[in-house]
Image (cartoon, rainbow, N blue to C red):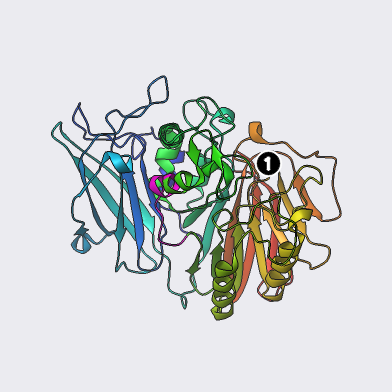
Amino acid sequence: MHRRSSLKLLAAGIPLSLAAKTFGADAAGPFFGSGVKVGEATSDSAIIWTRTSAIDECDKKFALPGVAAKVRVRYRIDGMPDSERTTDWQATQPEHDFAVQFALQDLTPGVRYRYVVEAESDAGKNQTDGTFETAPTETTVVPIRFIVTSCHKYATMDAPGLGQKIYRPMLDLAPQFFVHTGDIVYYDNDTKPLATNVELARLHWHRMDNLPYHRQFYPNVASYFMKDDHDILKDDAWPGQKYGDLTFAEGLEIFDEQNPLGESPYRTIRWGKDLQVWIVEGRDFRSPNRMADGPDKSIWGEAQWKWLQETVAASDATFKILISPTPIVGPDRPKGKNDNHSNAVWKSEGDRARRFLVENKMISICGDRHWQYYSVDEETGLNEFCSGPSTNQHAGGWSQDNVLPEHRFLRVAGGFLSVDVERSNDQSELIFRHRDVAGDVVHEQRFAADGES
């Protein structure tokens, strides 16, 4: 039922060549050492991001120096050579860390695109390729699969020199899209050097994006990147703070520089008749954690709240899912935690969020916590699924024996979450599957279109 593309060959023992290493390159480059990322796919648009580098692999100090070049993208509908279009050349420049983005417009809904990224400099030329799907229209009935993960730390990588193991089984599942809920890198708590200035913050992205498993996955799956505290500054950060010489504002600029992103940090994506996803922003607009709880204390901010209320009210999707970088239900550890909607110091807005989601028949997905769970809020009945961390080495912070009334499933280990929408006899079903780092299912929960599970 679910479409499987030639991407499955990549997980069947084929060498890491396509999109993992550059091909057809002159010996002097330029190279795509940070890979290629496809982001923000809609029914008629997508963004392709890349960065030109002087070398193809990080050196022993994790350095991946950039190099000036001109870059363009050729793209076409798979199987339709006559549909090929080519972007204008763009120059990669040091003030933007030699990164560049291409906004592809007027795409055809619900099809697979193939593309080639070309780079040229005085030293030589190079190209790499990839593929992605556009979203079907809101009247189209189609099987859907997407993947969610969280918390990538270089120090807890489980395939040293290659990346996180989950990227192989995630690619083998051939999702239409992927959501990373944040903590993609760890500026303040990882293998040194820590990111105390702009240069070192960029290094954290270079060494993560350079990993072969990551360079294989991201060119071939449309992704939506969310940020959390460790991606911007430091643990539990809020606007106005600093980490060494790195400011919160600089952290925001670097995140936008290193990922394919649209104009708004919060957005909603309609994927056919049956699914709409809301991706919320949890850092840009938040009040300080130490502020006294009350109706004026907010993680999302009133502008985002207004957008959320308006867009949810306008949706007729069968299933509505909100994805948050941090928990809304949890439960979280009761002591020393004060950063998310499940914590006592955010009870006012947490209650508001839980009520709103239940009233609108929505389900919550989150990252950030280093354990997998499916919880149901005792007061409102809100269902929440946490993807858990990307590796077993990164798991912790909760005891496997500490099963609370909210927990319907608890696993203190790494992995990821896959979500499917399927139809049988004209009835839609939403299926959540927690998976381990090998991609094997460790928990499954189903919801019918009428809300019964």
How many marks can you see?
1
Q: Nearer the viewer, residue 164 or 331?
A: 331
Residue most extreme to the left? 122
Residue at x 59%, y 64% (from the top left corner): 301
Q: Is residue 312 left or right of residue 289?
A: left
Q: Whole-percent x and y of residue 93?
A: 25, 42
Residue range (magenta): 254-264
Q: Whole-percent x and y of residue 202?
A: 42, 36
Residue 349 in view? yes
Amino acid type of the residue that numbered disc 1 sits on in the rendered structure: His
Residue 13 in view? no
Secondary element at tag 1: loop
Residue at x 25%, y 47% (from the top left corner): 117
Quadrant in the picture for residue 56: top left
Determine whether 6 is above or below 401 in the image: below
Q: Nearer the viewer, residue 432 or 153?
A: 153
Q: Nearer the viewer, residue 189 or 397?
A: 189
Q: Whole-percent x and y of residue 364?
A: 66, 61
Quadrant in the picture for residue 33: top left
Residue at x 76%, y 54% (from the top left corner): 345
Q: Whole-percent x and y of residue 182?
A: 55, 47
Quadrant in the picture for residue 112: bottom left
Determine whether 370 is above or below 137 in the image: above
Answer whether residue 255 is magenta in the image: yes
Residue at x 69%, y 72% (from the top left corner): 356
Answer whether residue 320 is magenta in the image: no
Q: Is residue 398 left or right of residue 7?
A: right
Q: Quadrant of the C terminus?
A: bottom right
Determine whether 239 is above or below 206 in the image: below
Check disc 1: other Cα within 10 Å, few if <14, some if 14-19, many if 20+: many
Residue bearing the label numbered 1: 370
Q: Nearer the viewer, residue 109 or 305?
A: 305
